Image (cartoon, helix red, strand yellow):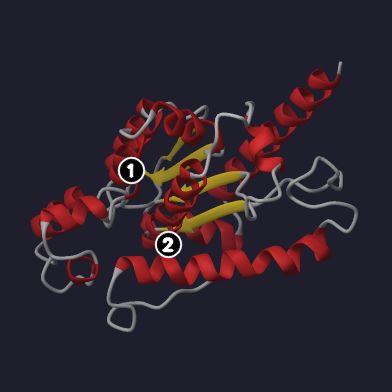
Amino acid sequence: VGYRTYPDAPTIDEQCGDVRLAWEKCEGVLNDLIMPTGNSHTNEKDDGWVGNIVSGHSSGAHVALLMLVDIIGEQAANFSPEKHFPATNIHDDKKHPWVADYFVGLSGPYDISYHFDYEAGRGVEQISPMKPICGHTREAFHKASPVKRLLSLMRNQREEKLAIQQLFPPTLLVHGIEDSTVPFTATTDAALLLRSCGLKQCDEIYLDNTSHQEVIMHFMLGGPAKDLVLEWLGQCNRKKKIAQIQSRL
């Protein structure tokens, strides 16, 4: 899925809106195409179906995670105490839209304020479109950062906090150690903050001798990043199936 870049999309929220529009359109198309005997709100999925995976590389990872945080924040705000956990009950509620089963972020800058300082150190902060699209000020940078936005949501009522923790899908952040465009510490810091929010699963993979572009090239041409992500998805899917079986016993 593509999205408009600056200046065609003047704000980060408009970029998120582009991706969200595509995400919501996918529900009507992919439910019938991939899961003819069921849908994402039920357990009646084809054996080969892993789930809905929200993923992006670089700024795409930033935009995708920001979109996911916004969607989950809206769902949590509509949470009512009558609904019971675990999260499968929330996901099974057909009042909720198409849901994400996994998030995979590749080489993303998840803290815009931190990344602005990094770009300033490289002397590119004035030519980078990140500053204008994210709002020019530190306050705006925080609002444009998905992890900071999630932390803000978590300060609300206890019920909403519990709903966010349950709704957030298993998350994997991947980064190349030799990345000079977005340092791998961006993933380290984001994962630490996500886990501090109480996410049930937030894992990290770091690739030696791998640069910024090489991570996404592994998905296009084959390589360790693709192999490790697919292995992680397979492990998560097996755990989910075991949990579903145990819940029926």
| Residue 248 in the image: above or below residue 103 | above
The span from disc 2 to disc 1 (Cα, nearest Å) is 15 Å
Q: Which of the 4 image quarters holds residue 154? A: top left
Secondary structure, mark 1, is helix
Q: Residue 72: percent from the left, percent from the top? A: 49, 46
Q: Where is mark 1, residue-wise?
A: 147
Q: Residue 165: percent from the left, percent from the top? A: 49, 31
Looking at the rendered image, the quarter that the N terminus falls into is: bottom right
Three-letter amino acid code at the position of disc 2: Gly
Q: Where is mark 2, residue-wise?
A: 60
The outermost residue toward the right is 37
Asked whether, in this view, residue 22 is left or right of residue 14, the answer is: right
- Image point (83%, 56%), residue name: 35
| Residue 50 in the image: above or below residue 244 | below
In terms of depth relative to the viewer, which is nearer, 104 or 245? 245
Three-letter amino acid code at the position of disc 1: Val
What number of labels is visible?
2
In terms of depth relative to the viewer, which is nearer, 18 or 95? 95
Which of label 2 and label 1 is nearer to you?
1
- Image point (55%, 35%), residue name: 80
Secondary structure, mark 2, is helix
- Image point (50%, 73%), residue name: 2
